[in-house]
Amino acid sequence: MQHEDVRDFHWYVDKAMASLVFLGGISAIVFIIGIFLFITREGLGFITDGLDLREFFFDPAWRPTSDSNPTYGAFALIAGTASITGLAVLLSIPFSIGAAIYIAEFAQGRTREILKILIELLAAIPSVVWGFIGLSIMNPLIIDMFDVPVGLNILNAGVILALMAAPIMTTIAEDALKAVPDRYREAAEALGATRWQVTLKVVLPAAKHGLMAAVLLGVGRGFGETMAVLMASGHSINVPDSIFDSVRALTATIAAELGETAVGSEHYQALFTLGILLFAVTFIINLTADLVMRGIKRS
Amino acid sequence: MADESKPQPQAPKHAIQTRGLNLWYGDFQALFDVDFDVRAGRVTGLIGPSGCGKSTLLRSINRIVERLGYVRTTGTIDVLGHDIFGANVELLQVRKQIGMVFQRPNPLPLSIRDNVLFGLRTHRDGDRKSRPSKEVEAQIVEESLRTVLLWDKVKDRLGEPAIRLSLEEQQKLCIARLLPVKPRVLLMDEPCSALDPDGTAAVEELIWSLKGDYTILIVTHNMAQARRATEECAFMLHGKLVEHTETAKMFVSPKNQSTADYIEGRYG
Ligand SMILES: Nc1ncnc2c1ncn2[C@@H]1O[C@H](COP(=O)(O)OP(=O)(O)OP(=O)(O)O)[C@@H](O)[C@H]1O
Ligand SMILES: [Mg+2]
């Protein structure tokens, strides 16, 4: 049987476009695997010989540059990251969820549009600018208000990070509320519930998975943030016992030290091990958030 | 509860009365000058071709139509003798007296028990002292579910999410959850259209059994159902109320030509 040859110019354009789009699609996967392989390879030497897991996770002494006896305890760094992120999420939850409720359930027309644009603008502020705000505005403010010697501490970084995480949390939470079918609201209102009762008793419980995902993504955002945290946290190695203590975050440690280490040295590899830890934790957080959100779509 | 044992002194003959009711969705007028009297304690059917305004009329009686910000209404609606647009009338009080059943069963994303108790809890929200005890609540749940013939099927799984029920059971639950606040009027918008024939028969039977205790206004597309399950019938066309009489009369000798045409299936 003789087929007509369809391979004209448009056919080639079509094929080319299809391959291009395909490449674009898989590049995301290629890059993420590439990055993972790279940081693993760089950090692997340390994990296989130098790494003492006990020391790494439980020793607060991060002294990679000590000549006589370098130690690589990441405990203080982990505590720093965890305390800043924890405070940020605690501060951010009421504001973000509140904003999401207002936008999704109460605001109308223009107010709603303007609010959404403002929140997107908040997300567009570069992190170094946030760090700058932490250094030059929050720092003196905290010193004044709380009468503490240093204003670069968990509180400062937590507030900055809360503001940085708020847009993504608000947006995801708003999507979660929007996804609650309107017939639930209608049914509840017909039963005599006020708008506020509808929100509290019907919409929020129905959206709880999405709201959880929003919080998780906020945590992920806080975990990975570097520049603002570096500038606002005080950057001193410390296991904190109050929010007025300066701390140092995992990310900030990598950013500050990597440039000064010899490629391939133990210190260099230890920093990459911190990178693996960060990568793994953010990956798990994002994956959980994603699974939680998929969970809602299925039910 | 005390007021139920005594016959109400001036119980109005009409549970619902509209006068000169017009309604606009934005610029589009959906109801024209509707004067509609629904007799208390009877089952009244609302029929008419698609898009004639049946749902709109029904949804304006409990003012749920106003959820859409762009709805405008003129005219009056009296429910049980009270003007529901009156300045001193509370919307929540109106909705307490008027239960609504929707076309698609819409149980709330809560447990079966919480669905039944939702209205009650909502209306009690103000005064926490009068909150009923667990036993009273359990009794109310049982009573309501028995009324809709659902009790035996669900009594062992009251804590389960209501969405796990079949559509027919969901619709029965949606009727059951109206009962605890003791409404006087039930509005039903094609309550059987999402159900299979068996479900339809079961829900129809249920509606029939509620007759007398409640004033029921039910929209239906199904002529057989209108004929079987209603005592009075109202026919709407293009946003106007065309005819309203005893069901028997309407199906045998309709006064209006368009009513006759519709009943005989000459309309869409
Ligand atoms: N939310 C809305 N916005 C604008 N127009 C609407 C809206 N809802 C209904 N309408 C219009 O109002 C008219 C009456 O609609 P309604 O839903 O009351 O009809 P119906 O008799 O219930 O129809 P059906 O039998 O299909 O349910 C229709 O022309 C419809 O297009
Ligand atoms: Mg309708």
Image (cartoon, coloured by chain):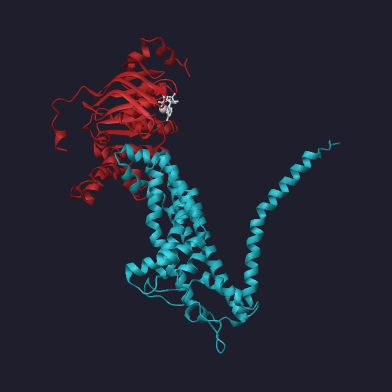
A181 shown above or below A237: above
Q: Nearer the viewer, residue A247 or B194?
A: A247
Tell me the residue at 44%/23% (across/down): B51
Instruction: Give the cyan chain's letter.
Output: A
Q: Position of residue B250 (x, y in %)?
A: 35, 14
Tell me the residue at 48%/58% (across/down): A217
Q: From the viewer's perspective, tell me whether residue A40 is left or right of residue A104.
A: right
Q: Position of residue B245 (x, y in %)?
A: 31, 15
Q: Check the picture and name the quadrant holding the N terminus of chain B.
A: top left
Instruction: Give the red chain's letter.
Output: B
A241 shown above or below B62: below
Tell me the residue at 36%/70% (across/down): A143
Q: Nearer the viewer, residue B265 or A17?
A: A17
Q: Position of residue A76 (x, y in %)?
A: 46, 76
Q: In which of the image's four quarters is ligand 1 placed?
A: top left
Q: From the viewer's perspective, tell me whether residue B42 is left or right of residue A216.
A: left
